[in-house]
Image (spheres, helix red, strand yellow):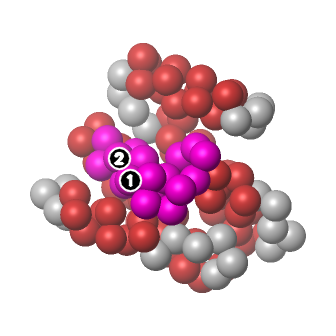
Amino acid sequence: MINAPDLIAVIMQCYHPAHVEIVSSVLEIATNICWLSDEGFDMVFRSFESYKVERNQPTIFEPLLRSLESANAVILSTVCAFLNTLLESPSDEKVRNRVRSLLHGNKVQ
């Protein structure tokens, strides 16, 4: 799967905050890919960047932030777990700090 960055981007295109099961599935897949390797993290992060551009989102975290407005406990726990993955899975501390800075810029603290 790590050799299929296009597949990861296609999976990300399925993300829509209004669909609980789809959001959960997309983020669970993305979480697992991030933890596999730094390469997996990079592919997932790039797919969020592509999603941002293709969906005219102000930031890469916009769909996640909108999902946090949900009252659904499954969505909240899945999004929080994924955000934690983005913050903790890269082995390079500079990458982790960059993600933290991006989240902080979105007022996520």
Q: Is residue 100 above or below residue 15?
A: above
Q: Is residue 34 above or below residue 99?
A: below
Determine which of the numbered discs, if any, sits on residue 5 in the image.
Answer: none
Circle 2: is it few (<14), some (14-19), or many (20+) Cα within 10 Å?
some
Q: Is residue 60 visible?
A: yes
Q: Residue at x 65, y 71 (%)?
A: 17
Please give left or right for residue 29 compared with residue 85 in the image.
left
Q: Which residues are magenta?
A: 42-61
Q: Is residue 87 above or below residue 71?
A: above
Q: Residue at x 33, y 71 (%)?
A: 10
| Residue named by callout 2 | 46
Per the picture, the main secondary structure of the magenta-coloured stretch is helix
- x, y percent for residue 43: 30, 49
| Residue named by callout 1 | 50
Please give left or right for residue 35 compared with residue 103 in the image.
left
Circle 1: is it few (<14), some (14-19), or many (20+) Cα within 10 Å?
some
For numbered disc 2, what is the local secondary structure? helix
Quadrant location of residue 107? top right
Q: Do tag 1 and tag 2 residues touch (Cβ < 8 Å)?
A: yes
Q: Residue at x 58, y 44 (%)?
A: 59
- x, y percent for residue 87: 54, 35
The quarter in which the N terminus is drawn is: bottom left
Pair 1/2: label in front: 1
- x, y percent for residue 93: 43, 18
For numbered disc 1, what is the local secondary structure? helix
Quadrant location of residue 23? bottom right
Q: Is residue 75 above or below residue 88?
A: below
